[in-house]
Amino acid sequence: MNNIPHIPVLLDEVLDGFSTIKEGYFVDCTLGYAGHSE
């Protein structure tokens, strides 16, 4: 496995989807740089 962190490819689309929500908490539960975790 390389040491390159996860690079989100749909970041703008996800942020656009959340832009209509006025309040709340958002949690990124990505594990292992978005690779397979054991």
Image (cartoon, rainbow, N blue to C red):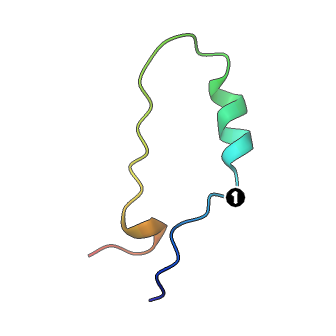
Residue 25 screen position, x and y as percent: 41, 24
Residue 26 screen position, x and y as percent: 45, 31
Q: Residue at x 72, y 31 (%)?
A: 16
Q: Quadrant of residue 9?
A: bottom right
Asked if 14 appears above or below 25 in the picture, the reply is below
Q: Residue furthest top?
A: 22
Q: Amino acid at mark 1?
A: Val
Q: Residue at x 45, y 73 (%)?
A: 35
- Number of numbered discs overlaid on the protein picture: 1
Q: Is residue 35 left or right of residue 17?
A: left
Q: Where does label 1 land, which residue?
A: 9
* Quarter containing the N terminus: bottom left
Residue 29 screen position, x and y as percent: 38, 49
* Quarter containing the C terminus: bottom left
Q: Is residue 17 left or right of residue 3?
A: right
Asked if 29 appears above or below 15 in the picture, the reply is below
Q: Is residue 14 left or right of residue 4?
A: right
Within 10 Å of the Cα at label 1, are there few (<14), some (14-19), or many (20+) other Cα atoms?
Answer: few
Helix, strand or loop under label 1 = loop
Q: Residue at x 46, y 81 (%)?
A: 3
Q: Residue at x 66, y 34 (%)?
A: 15
> Observer-nearest residue: 36 or 25?
25
Q: Quadrant of residue 19?
A: top right
Q: Residue furthest bottom?
A: 1
